[in-house]
Image (tube, rainbow, N blue to C red):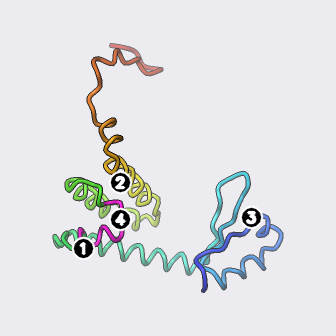
Amino acid sequence: MTTAYEDVPFSELLHHPAATARRLDAVRALRLRRRDAGDLALIRADQLEQDSTVVDFTARLLAGLVRTENTAALRQALPDALPWSVFLPEDDIEAMLAELVDTARGAAALENLAPIALLLAQWRHSAEIYADPALHAILTREPDGDLGPVPVPEGETAE
């Protein structure tokens, strides 16, 4: 295989399904571009199973390193894996590692990587805030005075 994936119009799959599927012999996956919706991916089942095996192994390895209290190795490798993590305070790095291990184990068990991607995006946003002193100051300052009453949510009554 020469490349990770190839962009293909969705209509090509509809009009030439066999020829389009044969392209998977040369690439890991096909990214099916759609005009009116999010892109789709077409991947061979054996490739998906291999990817799942790697994710499961990685999650278990990560969990094992934390369980054996080998967090020094994780902390040392973290900037290579997540370069933006250097902007996080020490306490947040510990919290992120703990959440990452738990989330990775759960996601691997469910064969759903979305929770890991969401967690990493959330921590990346935190790092972006810490990396920008002006933004950090705005988001962490106390509000000036009382902000007034909070309206009662629709469908609920005030007590």
Q: Which residue is mark 3?
A: 10
Q: CA distance from mark 1 to mark 2?
A: 22 Å
Residue 81 forms part of the magenta stretch: yes
Kind of residue indicated by mark 2: Trp
Q: Which residue occupies 22% across, 58% down?
A: 94
Q: CA distance from mark 2 to mark 4?
A: 12 Å
Q: CA distance from mark 1 to mark 3?
A: 42 Å
Q: Is residue 55 above or below residue 133?
A: below
Q: Quadrant of residue 47?
A: bottom right
Q: CA distance from mark 1 to mark 4?
A: 22 Å
What kind of element bears circle 1? helix
Where's residue 149, x and y in %? 35, 15
Relative horizontal placement of residue 102, taking residue 73 as reference (left or right): right
Q: Nearer the viewer, mark 1 or mark 2?
A: 2
Magenta span: helix, strand or loop, mainly? helix
Q: CA distance from mark 2 to mark 3?
A: 33 Å
Dot 2, how many residues are within 10 Å of its Cα: few (below 14), some (14-19), or many (20+)? some
Kind of residue indicated by mark 4: Pro
Kind of residue indicated by mark 3: Phe
Q: Nearer the viewer, mark 4 or mark 3?
A: 4
Q: Earlier in the sequence, mark 1 or mark 2?
A: 1
Q: Which residue is mark 4?
A: 83
Q: Which residue is mark 2?
A: 123
What kind of element bears circle 4? helix
Dot 3, how many residues are within 10 Å of its Cα: few (below 14), some (14-19), or many (20+)? some
Which stretch appears magenta? Answer: 75-85
